[in-house]
Amino acid sequence: MPTVSMKVNRNEVSGEVEGRTLLVEFLRHHLGLTGTHVGCDTSQCGACVVHVDGKAIKSCTALALACEGSDVTTIEGLARNGKLHPMQEAFHDNHALQCGFCTPGMIMASVDIVKRNGKKVSEATIRAELDGNMCRCTGYHNIVKAVQAGASKM
């Protein structure tokens, strides 16, 4: 089996994988990083969003081998020195989660939205860009508030 090597959450990692191993499987099953969720396996729900080389991707449709040498950040890698990332804090403070299943993907997508659109990102932009992230619990109102609050502190 081939070996894949990459940096995940600032740590060099490697492992033997089958050619068909998805990045989400490598993260969850090989590395034990279970914050990245598998929701649909078809790139529709967004529960699996991670950052690869600084860009948000859906890890359920990316092959682990295609990420060879990449810099990957998962929800576990956002916090620094025991302090939550501003977007994580904003989701907590604004009650932007209920069951929590979609939350890691929502937060990772939201960080990417702010990085690309700036701190004063509009509600319309947030709603349009989170279109690929499904939440069956919240109705999105508090998620949008959280993204705007987190953006202001990023």
Image: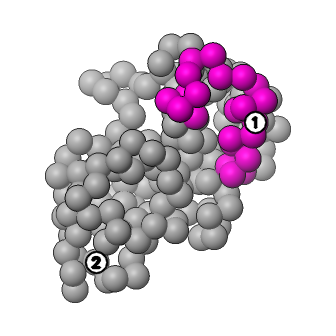
Q: Which mark is residue 98?
A: none
Q: Position of residue 114 (x, y in %)?
A: 55, 28
Residue span colored magenta: 113-134
Q: Going by the image, does 60 lie left or right of 31?
A: right
- On the image, numbered disc 1 is attached to which residue? 127
Q: Position of residue 42 (x, y in %)?
A: 63, 70
CA–CA distance in space, label 1 to label 2:
36 Å
What's under tag 2, amino acid-wise?
Answer: Val
Task: State the residue in front, 52 or 100.
Answer: 52
Picture quadrant where residue 113 is located: top right
Q: Is residue 117 magenta?
A: yes
Q: How many marks?
A: 2
Q: How many other residues sit within 10 Å of disc 2, few (<14), some (14-19) or many (≥20)?
A: some
- Quarter of the image with the N terminus is bottom left
Q: Position of residue 79 (x, y in %)?
A: 37, 30
Earlier-in-chain disc, 1 versus 2 = 2
Q: Is residue 132 magenta?
A: yes
Question: Which residue is located at x 26 percent, y 64 percent?
Answer: 68
- On the image, numbered disc 2 is attached to which residue? 17
**Viewer-side label of 1, 2:** 1
Depicted 37 relative to depicted 126: above or below = below
Q: Position of residue 153 (x, y in %)?
A: 51, 14
Q: Secondary structure at mark 2?
A: loop
Task: State the residue in front, 53 or 31.
Answer: 53
Asked which colour scheme the image uses, the reply is one colour
Q: How many other residues sit within 10 Å of disc 1, few (<14), some (14-19) or many (≥20)?
A: some
Instruction: Work out whether residue 138 can be spotted.
Output: yes
Depicted 102 relative to depicted 64: above or below = above
Depicted 44 relative to depicted 116: above or below = below
